[in-house]
Image: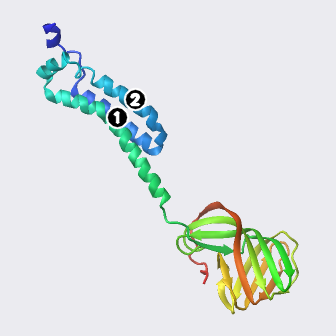
Amino acid sequence: MIGALAEVMDGAPSAIWLLSFGAGIGLAALVAVRRNRWLVIPFALLAVFALIELTVEIRDPYLRPAIIREAGSGYVAIGWLAGLLPLTGCILGWVANSRGRRRAGTKPAMENAALEFRDSVLAGLELSGGACVLSLGPGTVHRSAGRPGIDPGEGWTQDLEIRMDGATVRGPAPRLPARISDGELAVDDSGPGHLVPVPFRAEQRVVLKLVTVEEGAAIEIEGGAIEIKPVGEAKQVEAFAGRPDATPPS
């Protein structure tokens, strides 16, 4: 028994091998769990297995004294370190994944939205009691933390309702639904122009001009007030790289 204990280190792995093996599993666990937190389950099981296997000899009450005599207490410390590294990788990966999810949830909201008439679809146009109600289905809406339709942001589709009171319609009525090739809104002979904030309301003289792809002719609607409001759910279509040459909505 004494001879066996004296030669216990002959078949034992070196401290460098133990440390490299534990660090390799720990690094793999860190990278994998950071990308996908559910991978913590298989890697946690692997970490427990590695901890048991890498410390099986140094936990043995008969072998540990012989190991300390032959390799020193440092070997025992490295053995425990190597065994704990995979579990540490799982924990650090989980923490990094959680922080990333929190940052994603608190990224700057696309608070500002603007309607661009071009590429929107005019789905309805009704005159009733001096009011003109237009339905865009869908409308092209830009969202950005800065200036929508100008600064980088996101492109969305959204049904919208445009109501103009005291309205007068000039020009040929388009066949509906009709895709809009160009359009602009003037309030007291000024902006907002081609990009209109959403929602939007003005109780002043307003003129809305729309040109449809099929007709090619402009329909002009003049009124004493306007309200533009979204209807239903919006749908994200694409990322918007920005267009600094566009005219910002006022």
Left or right: residue 90 compared with residue 249: left
- 62 vs 194: above or below: above
- 39 vs 230: above or below: above
Residue 90 visible: yes
| Residue 46 numbered tag | 2
Q: In which quarter of the view is residue 196 placed?
A: bottom right
Structural crowding at the residue carrying mark 2, measured as other residues with C-alpha within 10 Å and reported as few (<14), some (14–19) or many (≥20)? some
Left or right: residue 39 compared with residue 3: right
Rendering coords of residue 72 (x, y %)? 13, 25
- Give the residue drawn at x 43%, y 41%: 33
> What's the residue type where badge 1 is placed?
Pro
- Give the residue drawn at x 29%, y 30%: 83
Rendering coords of residue 148 (x, y %)? 59, 73
- Give the residue drawn at x 83%, y 80%: 217
Residue 88 or residue 10, whichever sits in front? 88
Rendering coords of residue 91 (x, y %)? 37, 41
Rendering coords of residue 76 (x, y %)? 19, 27
Q: In which quarter of the view is residue 85 placed?
A: top left
- 174 vs 166: above or below: above
| Residue 86 numbered tag | 1
Dot 2 or dot 1, earlier in sequence: 2
Structural crowding at the residue carrying mark 1, measured as other residues with C-alpha within 10 Å and reported as few (<14), some (14–19) or many (≥20)? many
| Residue 3 numbered tag | none
Residues at discs 2 and 1 in contact (Cβ within 8 Å): yes
Q: Secondary structure at mark 1?
A: helix
Q: In which quarter of the view is residue 30 placed?
A: top left
The image quadrant where one finds the C terminus is: bottom right
The image quadrant where one finds the N terminus is: top left
- 25 vs 98: above or below: above
Q: Secondary structure at mark 2?
A: helix
- Give the residue drawn at x 86%, y 81%: 128
